[in-house]
Every structure is written in C-alpha cells, then in structure tokens.
Image (cartoon, rainbow, N blue to C red):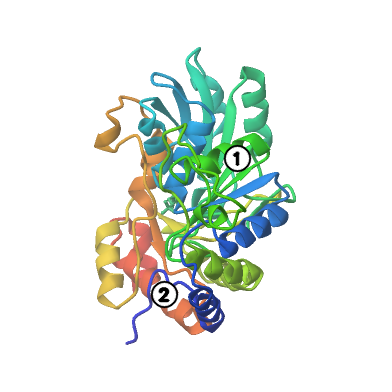
C-alpha cells in the first residue's frame, strides 16, 4: 500500500518560477528586493507597523526577547504545551521560563494559570497558538495590562487561523511566525516577526543583520557612507530565495487552508463515534490552522503500539507535541498536569493539503482498528470483532 506521510509541504511550479526569478536577479542573499517585498506583503496582510523576515521562528522569538529587553534573572511565563522554542528563547537571555499549564479543551495557555504565576520578577508572557489553535488573547492581554507585562504571540503554527475575527500572528504586540517545512506556509526554513511598534521592528531588523542593516541597500546608495557597528547583532536574515517562495505561499494560504479544513472536518465526522479517542474542538470565536491534527487516546490505549501498527502500514503518525516542563534541559520542579497528560496521550495523524478523501478514510480505518486492538478497556471489546 502506498505510504501516507504525516506531513507534506505543498511546494510546486509557482514557487519554482519565483526561485528562478531570484537566480536571474543575481541577489540570492537576504534583505534584498524579494525580502523587502515579502516584508511589505506581511505588514499589509497583518495590518502591523512592521514585519521583519528572519531565518526561522526560533530566531524571531530570540529577537523578540532582545527587543523587549529581557534581562538575566527576569521571569517570562510561557505556554507549557507546544514545541518548546519559547522557553529556549527565554533561556538565551539567561532569564527563567515559568511554565503555565494549558486548557484541556484547546491545549492553549490557560489565562488563569498565567495570572497565578505572576511574581514581581515577571516581565512578560509568551502564548503559543498550539498546533494552529489561537490562545485566549482577550484574557491574556487583560492580565498583561494589569501587571505591565509584554505579551508575545508564538504563531509558528497558526498562519491562516483567526481569533475573534482577527488574524493569528497579529493578536499581540509582537507575533512570531514560522515557515518551516512542517507549517502551513513554508520556504523550507523561514520565519517572520510582526510588530505593532515600529521601534521594535527597526531594532529587530538591525539585530538580524549583525547590527548593520541591509548589505543590498549599501551597494545602492550614492557615495561611500561606511556603516558602523554599534550593537552586537546576529545573522538571522531570511534569504531572498526563501522570501520569493513565501510570497507565492502566502498567496496560496487560503487554498491550502481550505484543504486542511476539509480534511479536519472529514476526520471529525468519521471518528466522532470512536469512544477510545477524543477529537480537537474549536471554540466558536476562533478558527484553526490545522498545522497538526491531534487525537487524544483513551488512557486504556497503548499509544506506542498504535503508532507501531500505523507506521507498519505506511501511515505517518507522531506523539503530537511536547510538554516543556518535563524536558531535562529546563530543570524545573513545576508541574503542569494538563500538559503532562496531553503529552502522554495525544497522537498526531496525517494532516497536509495533499491528502485525498480516500487516504483519510484509510487512516481512520487503521486508527480505529489499532486503538481497539491495543486498548485494555472492556469498552474496546464490542468494536473489536
Ligand atoms: C515550529 C515551532 C517553532 C519553531 O519554528 P522554526 O521556524 O522551526 O524555528 C516555534 N514555536 C512553535 C510553537 C512551533 O511549533
């Protein structure tokens, strides 16, 4: 049987043609014409003061921490469930990530947990739009305002999602996007930082280019002004090759997301009656980008055995995402029971824009059979025959 991959990046002829244009231009490096055009496209799409194209979302988060002036010893509250890039970004500053548990229904940061974790050392909050589901920004912003904290949105997985009619990525003063190959719009590797405050955008753009700004621009000015290095910066630029790919991908985001929505609806319909797993629920006031489709297995189900069975049939699957507080690198004694439970029981099944209805049916049949075979619950017996 033909394999059904867990993820597949939808990159095609239009993206190739855009890359060919960059080759012909002779400027493949960053902060050139394509990079600038992408930044303008992002700023317009997201209605923000500035958008900075960077090498990846990890770099965007790092630059956000620098621009927001996080200092050693500061505490930053981060969502516990999700790829643990926010906690790593806090650690780049020698600051302390404080892990907030998540809501059991949306898997996004629990505003009450955030409120309970604020101390005199807290300087900000990084919320995560978990695998494409926007967090509760109305409540989070109120908490941030009450305590004078910054709020950053890690929208790495959420390109195309919405919250209360607003676009994910622009739901906080700073938003960080990822264009990694596993996200909804991709240039292989890539990212962007969206800023409501133009000063933050300017600071981030400068620091992303070793602190001196666009080399492309320098070659085009009249005379010979010699730039000076006044700040330690990094090389976090996005290449113009990647920027050209992303311009095409952003133009296709509605089409790609529409496909993911159809697949999510099909999974929802076909799996609704399966008692040994539960499905993601999207609150009325938001839409999901479906970067990953995660089901939550009943506690009686042996997840590793189910995964082995699916993979044995060529069906891609994974554990979903991560509980950050249990990762040894963070050495915390905090507990986040909801996140820990999701980390133990969730499972990602194939989700990408190229899946066909037949493939979805095959995944559902294999998953249904596997959870019943590998459940210790008597509830499984009725359906196993
Ligand atoms: C994928 C991801 C990142 C990292 O994105 P990169 O572009 O690979 O650096 C950060 N945060 C979250 C929540 C992610 O899912």
- Reading the image, the residue beneath label 1 is 202
Q: Is residue 247 above or below residue 378?
A: below
Which image quarter is the N terminus in?
bottom left
- Reading the image, the residue beneath label 2 is 363
Horizontal side, residue 44 vs residue 221: left or right? right
At mark 1, the secondary structure is: helix
Where residue 101 sits: x, y (%)? 46, 33
Looking at this view, name the residue that lies furthest to the bottom.
1
For marks 1 and 2, give the CA distance: 47 Å
Badge 2 crowding class, 10 Å Cα cut-off, few under 14, some 14 to 19, many 20 or more, is many
Badge 1 crowding class, 10 Å Cα cut-off, few under 14, some 14 to 19, many 20 or more, is some
Horizontal side, residue 164 vs residue 278: left or right? right
**Which one is nearer the viewer's eye here, 30 or 247?**
30
Q: Is residue 318 above or below residue 359?
A: above
- How many numbered callouts? 2
Q: Quadrant of residue 197?
A: top right
């Amino acid at each position: 049987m033909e394999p059904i991959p867990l993820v597949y990046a939808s990159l095609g002829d239009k993206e190739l043609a855009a890359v060919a244009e960059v080759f012909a231009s002779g400027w493949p490096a960053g902060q050139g014409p394509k990079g600038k055009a992408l930044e303008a496209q992002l700023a317009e799409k997201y209605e923000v003061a500035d958008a900075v194209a960077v090498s990846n979302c990890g770099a965007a988060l790092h630059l956000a921490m620098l621009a927001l002036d996080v200092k050693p010893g500061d505490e930053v509250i981060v969502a516990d469930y999700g790829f643990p890039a926010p906690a790593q970004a806090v650690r780049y500053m020698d600051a302390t990530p404080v892990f907030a548990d998540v809501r059991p229904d949306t898997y996004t940061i629990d505003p009450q947990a955030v409120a309970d974790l604020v101390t005199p050392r807290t300087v900000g909050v990084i919320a995560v739009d978990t695998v494409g589901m926007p967090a509760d920004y109305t409540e989070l912003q109120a908490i941030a305002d009450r305590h004078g904290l910054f709020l950053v949105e890690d929208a790495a997985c959420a390109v195309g999602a919405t919250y209360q009619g607003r676009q994910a990525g622009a739901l906080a003063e700073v938003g960080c996007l990822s264009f990694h190959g596993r996200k909804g719009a991709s240039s292989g590797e890539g990212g962007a930082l969206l800023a409501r405050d133009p000063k933050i955008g300017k600071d981030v753009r400068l620091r992303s280019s070793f602190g001196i700004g666009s080399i492309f621009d320098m070659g085009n000015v009249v005379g010979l002004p010699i730039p000076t290095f006044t700040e330690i910066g990094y090389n976090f630029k996005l290449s113009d090759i990647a920027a050209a790919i992303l311009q095409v991908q952003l133009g296709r985001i509605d089409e790609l997301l529409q496909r993911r929505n159809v697949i999510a609806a099909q999974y929802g319909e076909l799996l609704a009656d399966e008692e040994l797993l539960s499905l993601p629920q999207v609150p009325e006031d938001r839409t999901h980008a479906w970067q990953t489709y995660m089901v939550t297995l009943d506690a009686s189900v042996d997840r590793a055995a189910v995964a082995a069975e699916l993979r044995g049939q060529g069906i891609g699957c994974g554990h979903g995402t991560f509980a950050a507080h249990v990762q040894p690198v963070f050495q915390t004694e905090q507990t986040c029971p909801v996140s820990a439970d999701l980390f133990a029981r969730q499972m990602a099944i194939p989700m990408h824009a190229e899946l066909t209805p037949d493939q979805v049916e095959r995944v559902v049949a294999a998953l249904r059979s596997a959870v019943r075979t590998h459940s210790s619950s008597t509830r499984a017996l009725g359906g196993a025959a």
